[in-house]
Structure formats: structure tokens, C-alpha cells
Amino acid sequence: MLFTRERNSNNQNIGIETSNLSLKVADIFDNSNNYFSSNVSGINSFRASDRSSYTTDQTYKDLAKSSENNKNTTQAISLVTSSAVVAAIQPDLIIQNAINPSVGSVGGSLEVSYQVKNQGTGSSASYHQTKFYLSTNTTLSNDDTYLDSDYFFSSIAAGAYSASTTTLNIGNSIAAGNYYLLYQADGNNNIAESNESNNIVAKAIAIKKADLIIQNAINPTVGSVGGSLEVSYQVKNQGAGSAGYHQTKFYLSTNTTLSNDDIYLDSDYLSPIVAGAYDAVTSTINISNSIAISNYYLLYQADGNNNIAESNESNNIVAKAIAIKKADLIIQNAINPTVGSVGGSLEVSYQVKNQGAGSAGYHQTKFYLSTNTTLSNDDIYLDSDYLSPIVAGAYDAVTSTINISNSIAISNYYLLYQADGNNNIAESNESNNIVAKAIAIKKADLIIQNAINPTVGSVGGSLEVSYQVKNQGAGSAGYNQTKFYLSTNTTLSSDDTYLGYDFFSPIAAGAYSAITSTINISNSIATGNYYLLYQADGNNDIAESNETNNIVAKAISIKKADLIIQNAVNSTSGLTGGNIQISYQVKNQGAGNAGYSYTKLYLSKDQILTNEDILLNSEYTSSIASGSYSSETFSIQISKTIAGGSYYILYQADGSNNIAESNETNNIVAKAITIIKNVGYDSTDGYGLINAAAAVAKALGQTTFADVPNLGGNDWGADLVKAPEVWAKGYTGKGIVVAVLDTGVDRNHSDLSNNIWKNTKEIAGNGKDDDGNGYIDDVYGWNFDSNNNNTLDGNSHGTHVAGTIAGVKNGVGVTGIAYDAKIMPVKVLGDSGSGEDSGVAKGIRYAVDNGANVINLSLGGDEPNSEIASAVQYAASKGVIVVMAAGNSSGSEPIYPARYAKNWGLAVGAIDKYQEMAYFSNEAGATTLPYVTAPGVDIYSTLPGNSYGFKDGTSMATPHVAGVIALMLSAKKGLTDAQVRQIVTTTAGNSLA
């Protein structure tokens, strides 16, 4: 099949080349595009013309030779012959298929289409022009009106034509009337033609004029100085011709006639309008502040720029009466507090009323502080409000917040409200915009009162304090902060230690705000006697009447804790994989309190804590007051990876070094313990982690292979099962076939394609069972879920499994445990991830009968099945090793078919990179069976579509073991099921002391 695909690829390349050749031939000789046809015709004509010229010349010479005695006759004949030849080879351009509108407009344009044909039989017509004229008859004469021309840059071969569509402009100076549109081929007479009298075609056309009028004009009867008008109208073309682009202009006039002293307002730009049609427009027109109030006419002028040649130029204007008025803005119903605070804000409410006859556009209200009721240059600007337009007689109600800066002096003022603060509105009365409201500006005065804090605090601990911030001033205080410092005296200075702050909302005059807060004391603070300083208005945000009374000082001593371990008790011995009981007390014998901490337990060969010691546990310890202790009792598990021997359990108080202590050297207590290696089968993890280095070495009758550097990264699973140690000896799974009974395999994945098994006895696609195994075209295995030969993976599970077993070692993606082994895809699960027992059983037998050495079953169920059991037994009898996943239900024993490992094959549980049992993995169970563990958490491997990803499960652990078995079989051919089971279990982690 691979060979066939290569051959198909070659054929496809040849096909492409052949197709390209065909296209080239077609481009030259048989393309319907006129450009290429013209070229071909031109080439052929040139050759024919060349031959004709040669023949004619030869004939002339022959005639001359045969008529030597009659030279006059000979010359006559030759001249006639030459004249005939010249005429025969000259082009002849005509206009054909000319199409234009029957009506055109003065000042408008015409779209015409036509063809220029060369009806000559000889040479091509080169560069030439078609010219267009308006004429009162069908003959071109000097008094006809030239319109435009078309340029033809390409030659037109004899018998060919060139088609053109072009636009002709009709000038405003052309009179309306009935004409002929003359199309003149070879308009500049550049081409020597066999017939110079047939270049013109005449098409009748009537030239008309437009007539634009304004109709249905609507505008308000009243407008405002400085405001705008919304108008609507229609421009109708009541003429017989079309009107091009044009403008409508607007004027204010004291009468209905447009004159030079009328006031231009604005214009609208309109698109062309055909005869009899109209364009409806809605537009906004601005009335400037300079226009005087009065009664006017609003003039609408069609064709305002006089661009359109019209049949009637005197009917463009319509006049609509309008009165132009002015607004008059005043402040009414203004309300504000009688007292404001420096640095604070005022909430004010007021109305802006328009008591004028005209509308007011967008405008502003401005606010000032003044010592009197009149606005002047020395008044203090505060803020502004932006307001929307207000129609005549209406008002706008506003509530606004005005800020009083810290720079304003306390005093009695007037708050000035100024309508039309920017003077944007042209008003009928410009002197009534201001209203004044009395206000007194005061200052706050913040103090600390009723401050309470502990007399003793701890380095690294926290203090709970309570206090009140009172405003004893006459003005309100805005948002403010209280800051805390540690000081050696009662005065705040730059060398005091900042601790933290509290944020406060505004406080009215005479009021206070009470708070309880927690302050942290950092580990860097030295023990000693201090004052805790409370500073009101810590950021100095509030302008106060007294800036010297913000601080209160409270005495406090800062101490340190001292944590020790006492009364530590643990078992004197423990088994790997088992639990030991622990109890101890953490006592704080220091003068300061200790916050929360962690007590850590280590396993050490001596009584001194070093980086080589093994962390067993980290236990959270709550805060402990000075002189108190906390008791803890719990059990911890001893990892199976720990070697047997004599150790100490180190109990370390403040294991994370969170607490600043008066003595940092007394945190550890050591208690002796003997760790006994639990050798052999365990009900949790069976025989433990599979060891490829030891298993392959034992299969060869050697001692375990020496360690090599780890691969690291996403290949940590290979490191854990010690596959690189086997590779270093030259065993990589070469010659071994591993059947993956799963959801299928993406055999096209770049990390798998070179390692896919192929049934070489089967001929792809011939619809026959060539090898007689009962399956038609099973070149890449068989699909027992759908009973066909499609073994591709629509789920991703099987492809992930395959990558762990035999991903190619290419520095990309993942390296399989047996990276030179072959994968036999056998699809027994559908794309949903489920399948039938019978399909699994048939898949096992298929794999055995078709040459598999190892079978990976990353699947299972809760119920036994005799067909599957019989198939596993059949595989074992043929020397094929079946590796089965223990299941992911956190059960106390494996699911099926892994439970059949009691008699045949191997069961596999999952561990993580720390060699701890995965929480989801089914355990080995009380009944001894060949159960080993392998990495099954966060396993990186191949996914369909040249992708990669992580998966968890005993399904991911099983291919690690299948890969190790492939390494064993590649090193030692012919190992039986029983031998493999015995070697694997006796070299796994729990069997090696």
C-alpha cells in the first residue's frame, strides 16, 4: 500500500505537468479569450501575408521575363498587379453593433457600446481612435459638435473586432434638439484602409434639458439665533432631460426673491435625478449668532451653483416664512448648603429656564465663589455643568456636585450660578444669567480618640486596634486615611516605622467614625519598647483648622515568639508502604505570640536537617500565644520507594520559617525509627513499579543495567521505568509487534507512521482476502467495532496509547518506551470509547494469529466474560503477552480482563511522577497476581492530527508496561508468558530490597 501510494503520488505529479502542457497549448491555439485569439489570428495573417507578397513578387518577375520584347506592356501589368496586391492586404475599419440611449441631457453623459471591426482581408489595424460627434444629419461635417474619443492601443487583426463601452459627456453649451450620434472609426485617419468611406455609423438621439424645482418644503415657523433648523423638501426634475450632481442652497431673506444682500446659510449636495423623478431630503441648517432677530423668508434654491443647464432657469427658488428669535436663559430654584468645607464638596440643585422666544442650544452653567453677588475677574471658578438644548418656555433641572479645593480660604461667600457660562447662546437679555446664594466655607479638624491596642505585640504577628476619628471642626471632612507607625517616642518623625493605614468615608462636622482594625508587625522589626502612633488625616488630604493635633501615641512592647517541639512520640519501626503514628506538641516559650506556622517532619539518617532528608509531612499549626502549646496526633505513610534502614524522624517547628523567633536554633527534635523494607507482593500496588533495566538484564541472565542520565521533561515516564538504561544496551523493541486493541490508531501521525505494522500479505483495495485470514483488505489491521478495515482513531485514546509504546525517537513530541517496535492497530472500541466483549475477544485472537508479540488492553469492565478469558488464554498459549489495565474506579482490586492476570498476562496500576499510587487506580487486591505499576498521571503522548496532549489513567500506565515487555522480547526472543510474568514480578520495585 505504501508503494502504491508512492506510485500514485508520481502519477499525480505527471498529471499536473501534462495538464499544464494542455493549458499552454490551449492558451496559444484554442482560447476563447479574444486577446489570445487576436494574437493567433495576427500570427497566421502575418505568415499568409508574407507568402502572398513573395508569390506576387515572383509572378511579377516571371511576367517581366516573358515579356522582354514589350517593356511598356510588362510595366503596366506589373503596376496593376502591385496595386491589387496592396489593396488586398490593407485593413478596413467599420463600426458595428452600436448602442446608445435614444435621449440624452444637456450637461449629462451617455453610456455607449459598439464594436470596431477590421473587415479587411490582409494586415492588422494598429493604434487608432474612434471619435464621436453630434450632427443634425448622418454625414460628418465641419459644423458637427465633437464630443469625445476612444483610444485603441491593441491591433485588430483582419476579420477580428474589438468591443468597447465608454461614457460621453454632453456639454452645457449644446442646444436641446434632435441629433444623430456619429461613431467614426479611425477618427484621426491614422490607418491606411482599403475603404476610407465606410468609417461612420449614425444613431438617432434627442438631446433634452432638465428643469429642477423645489416642492413640498417644510421648516419650522420659528428659528433661534445660534440654533439650528430641521427642514425637509423634495427636488423634482420636471424637465425632459436628466440632471447631474447638483446642490440646494439655503438663504435668509427679507423677501421672496434671492439677492446679493440675502444671508447664505448652508447647502445640500444631491445625486443625479432622471427626468420626471425627485429626490427627498431632510437636512439640518445652522443659524449663526450674528443673525438679527426678525421675520424672514427661508429660500430654498434648487441648482444653487447653477451647474445644471435647465429648460427653465427662473423657477429654482421656493420661499417659506420664518421668524428668527433669541433665547433668554436664567437660573431658578437654586438650592445649596449654607456651609461648605475646604477640600470638600457641595451638592447643589437648580433649574436653567429659557424664558426667551427662541430655543437655546448646548450650553454650560458655571459656578464661582464670590465675596459679593456680582461676577468679576477675581472670583474663584469652581466647576461647570454641560446642558442639552432647551426650547422656548422650558427648563432643565440639574443636581450636581461641586468640589471646594484645599486652597480656598475659610470665609463667608456667595455661590454664583451662571447660566450660559461660556456665552455660547445669543440671548435677548445677556444681563440676567447669574443667581447668587450665600454660603460659608469652613474647615474640618480631625483627631484620634478612644484608641485601644494590646500592650504587647509580636514580631511577625498582628495587632487588633480600635479607635475613633472625630471631626471637631466646623467644616466637613472628605475621604481620609489614618496611618499607623511604631516610634521610640510620641512624636512622628521620618525614622519611625510605617505599619499600615485605614481608609475613611467623609465625616461631618461634630461627628466621628469608629473602627476596629488589624495591623501587621513585620519580621524585620526589632524587639523593644515603642509607641504605636495613630495619625488622623495620614495623607494630609484634609485642609484642617488645626494641623497639629492629628496624632495619638499608645505604649506597646514588641516581643518575639520561640517555638519548640516537646513530647514527640512515634513508632520505633515502620514498614515501607505502611503508616506510623505521630504525636507531639508545639510550644511557644517566647515572650511574643506566634502566628500560624507549619510543622514539618523529615526522615533523616542523622539528627541534623539537610537537603538530602526526605520530607514526610507538613502540618498546619494555628497561632500560639506566649507560654501556650498546640498538640497534634496523626498518622503518616512511609513511601515504598524508601530503602530499609535506621533513620531519625526530625520534627521541625516553624518548618516554613514564617515566625520571627528569639531563638532560631531550637526548632528541631529527632526521634529514632527503623524502616523495614516491605519486600514482595502488596495488596495496594502488587509488585510495585516495573523496572525495565532489571527485567531485561534478568531475561539475559545479567545483573541490572547501570543507571544513565534521565531524559527529563515530558519523557519522565520513560525515566521512571528505566527504559533509557535498556536503550543504552542497544535494545529498542526492534522486530517486536505490539497490538493496540483500542479506539484505533492515527497511523498517519508523524511520530507513529514509521512504526505502523502492515499486513504485507494483503493487497490493498482489491476487495479480496489475499492472505486467507478471513478479513478483506486488512492491510492496517481490522475494525471489530464496525466490521471493516478502517482502523483510524476518531477518539484519541488509542493514538495516545500507541505513542507511549512506540513513538518514534526523533527529538519531537514523545519517545516511546520501545521506539523501534511496530504497532498493530486493532479497533475494538468505537469512537465513543465503548465496544462489545465479543469484539475484544475477536481482536485478541486476530492479533495473535497475525503476528503480534504483545497485546495492550487499555480497557475493561466490571463483569467477567468467558470469550475474553479464553482469548487471553489462547494468547498466552501462543507466547503472546497480554498487558491489561487495572481500572480507574479507585477499587480494591482490578477490573476485567486485568483480573485474569492471576493466570495469564499482567495487570497494571497507575502511579504519579513521585511514585505515589494514583488516587483513581484500582489496587492489586488481596489475591496475589502479577500486578505491577507504571506512570499514569499527566502522561504526554500522541493525539490524532499530528497533535500531542496529556491524559491520566491506568490506560496510560499499561502501554509503559507493554513497551517494557517489547524491550524484553527484543533482547531475548522466545520468552513465554510464564517467564515474562516471573521476570517482571521479581524485578519490580517491591521485589528489590
Image (cartoon, rainbow, N blue to C red):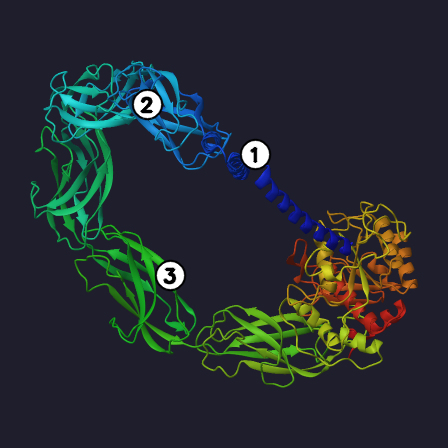
Q: In which quarter of the image is the N terminus?
A: bottom right
Task: Specify the quadrant of the image occupied by residue 598.
Answer: bottom right
* Cα–Cα span, label 1 and label 3: 90 Å
Residue type, label 2: Tyr
Q: Circle 1: is it few (<14), some (14-19), or many (20+) Cα within 10 Å? A: few
Earlier along the polypeptide chain: callout 1 or callout 3? 1
Contact (Cβ within 8 Å) of mark 1 with mark 3: no
Between 445 and 950, which is closer to the camera in this rendering?
Answer: 950
Q: Residue at 15% of width from left, 23% of height from top?
A: 252
Task: Specify the quadrant of the image occupied by residue 399.
Answer: top left
Q: Position of residue 533 (x, y in %)?
A: 29, 68
Q: Circle 3: is it few (<14), some (14-19), or many (20+) Cα within 10 Å? A: few
Judge depth for marks 3 and 2 and give the one in front.
Answer: 2
Q: Mark 1 points at which residue?
A: 32
* Cα–Cα span, label 3 and label 2: 97 Å
Mark 2, secondary structure of its residue = strand
Q: Mark 3 points at which residue?
A: 517
Q: Residue at 14% of width from left, 17% of height from top?
A: 257
Q: Name the residue under label 2.
A: 133
Residue type, label 1: Ser
Residue type, label 3: Ser
Q: Is residue 745 visible?
A: no
Q: Where is residue 826 in the image (x, y as percent from the top left)?
A: 80, 54
